[in-house]
């Protein structure tokens, strides 16, 4: 991994972590899931950005990746407040 990509991910973490997690908490209502998905998005950035290049708007890329992970991870579960009783 190049030093430029590492520096970009480090900067994005410092500047965007709180916003990414806050957005995911609003979307999912679940603090733990929000943090897990944000971590996955940053890990994915470390894998993808060296090959694809650092996106023009890293925060937007990270938020989208994390939101998609949260949505994909939540499929198959009953919506909050409507848990199946069995």
Image (tube, helix red, strand yellow):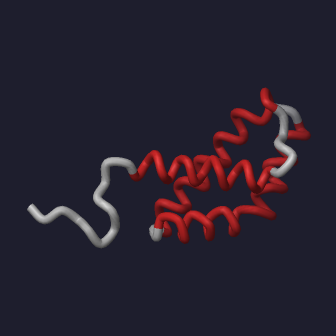
Question: Which quadrant holds residue 11?
Answer: bottom right
Q: In this view, does 63 lie to the left or right of 80?
A: right
Q: Which residue is drawn at 89% across and 38% down?
A: 3
Q: Which quadrant would the N terminus be assigned to in this image?
A: top right
Q: Residue at x 87, y 46 (%)?
A: 56
Q: In this view, does 30 lie to the left or right of 85?
A: right
List x then y, in percent, for residue 60.
74, 54
Question: Which quadrant holds residue 81?
Answer: bottom left
Q: Is residue 33 left or right of residue 22?
A: left
Outermost residue toward the left?
A: 86
Q: Is residue 19 above or below residue 65?
A: below
Q: Residue at x 63, y 47 (%)?
A: 65
Q: Which quadrant would the C terminus be assigned to in this image?
A: bottom left
Q: Residue at x 71, y 41 (%)?
A: 45
List x then y, in percent, for residue 53.
84, 34
List x then y, in percent, for residue 50.
80, 31
Q: Which of 75 and 53 is in front in this view?
A: 75
Total marks in image: 0
Outermost residue toward the right?
A: 4
């Amino acid at each position: 991994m190049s030093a430029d990509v590492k520096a970009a991910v480090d900067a994005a973490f410092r500047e965007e972590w709180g916003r990414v997690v806050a957005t995911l908490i609003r979307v999912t209502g679940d603090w733990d899931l929000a943090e897990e998905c944000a971590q996955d998005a940053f890990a994915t950035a470390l894998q993808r950005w060296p090959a694809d290049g650092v996106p023009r708007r890293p925060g937007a890329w990270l938020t989208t990746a994390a939101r998609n992970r949260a949505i994909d991870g939540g499929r198959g579960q009953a919506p909050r407040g409507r848990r199946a009783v069995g």
